[in-house]
Amino acid sequence: MAEQPTLLFGVGATKAGTGWLHDYLVRHDQCHMRSLKELHYFDACDLDGAGFHLRSLAAKRAAARRGLARTDAAADPARAARLAARIADCDELIAVVAGGAAAVPAYLDYLTRGAGTARLVADITPAYALLSVERLRMMAALAPVTRFVYLLRDPVERLWSHIRMNTARGLKEGEDFAGRAARLLRRLIAGKGAADIRARGDYAAAIDRLQAAVPARALMIDLSERVLSDAGLNRLCGFLGIAHRDGQTGRRVHEGQSLTMTEAQRRTAAAFLAPQYEFVEKMFGPLPASWQANMAKV
């Protein structure tokens, strides 16, 4: 009987390098990854998000079907195959998510089907960092070898990247991108909205839950700046039990629309996030220069 692959949960943080992690594993010859990055199975079960995620999957499936209809399969068979696989993955995952908490066996089958001799399968869903200790503990026991990775990015840079992403998603035709982003930042800091963005950037709360639920040997918490280096990549691969493969550590994935923060915005955000800087500094010691530059603005 083939050895069961390691099961990796990439649980965050949002906009802290999880896109790069997924891209690296997709390209790794010892990993088996389905075509969808964020599966959202467990948060759909626990955080009342099943309806939203089912609609999102249906939209992704429709987009893939439109792409396939426009593709000349004879001229570009690789693209046609990718789109067909994405449609099939969406169909299968829709059934899993619709099955709710009782569908854990189907979820595991979804992850491992077609894995062959792969040493690792993965679900990279940053929203899982918001799950309860009880749910995270259950996830940690789903496979003989389970691993969790939580990456931390400079809090101000992570916050601004998340705000830009959410701003772009809700932008109406003719609306000012910079103005809408500024309003979202003001509302977030005033506690009048954007609760999800605040929660995704609460490193202290997420790490407390992870450390309470996941055995230390199965949990890797690190700064994205450190992991996105040759030495960091070597540590990551060792932790995951896969061979080191060179990665494009300087490559940005899902960077989103560019927008520079004003100095006033940066100072305000740094003051709001001061507890997160203090928490991470106590955990890791001296922080990278980019982090310290924002800390100095408090």
Image (tube, rainbow, N blue to C red):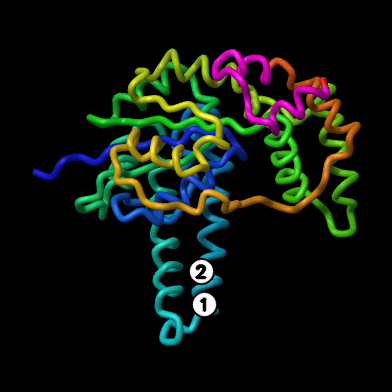
**Distance between mark 2 and mark 1 Cα atoms:** 6 Å
Q: Is residue 289 part of the magenta span, yes or no? A: yes
For the stretch drawn in magenta, what is the main secondary structure?
A: helix
120 left or right of 194 in image: left
Foreground pick, 270 / 83: 270
- Quadrant in the rendering for residue 161: top right
Residue drawn at point x = 60 percent, y = 36 percent: 14
Residue found at x 82% / y 45%: 260
Q: How far across and how far down the image is residue 171, in percent?
A: 80, 51
Q: Is residue 199 left or right of residue 91?
A: right
Under circle 1, the secondary element is: helix
Q: Residue at coordinates 35% horizontally, 31% vertically from top-left?
A: 147
Q: Amino acid at mark 2?
A: Arg
Residue 41 included in the magenta stretch of the image:
no
Per the rendering, the mark at residue 69 is 1
> Horizontal and vertical percent for residue 40?
49, 39
The answer to whether one can see residue 77 in this image is: yes
Residue stretch in magenta: 276-297
The residue beneath circle 2 is 65
Task: Indicate left or right for 155 with 296 as reference.
Answer: left
Which residue appears at 48% of the width and 26% of the height? 221
Is 242 placed above or below 75 here?
Answer: above
Q: Quadrant of the C terminus?
A: top right
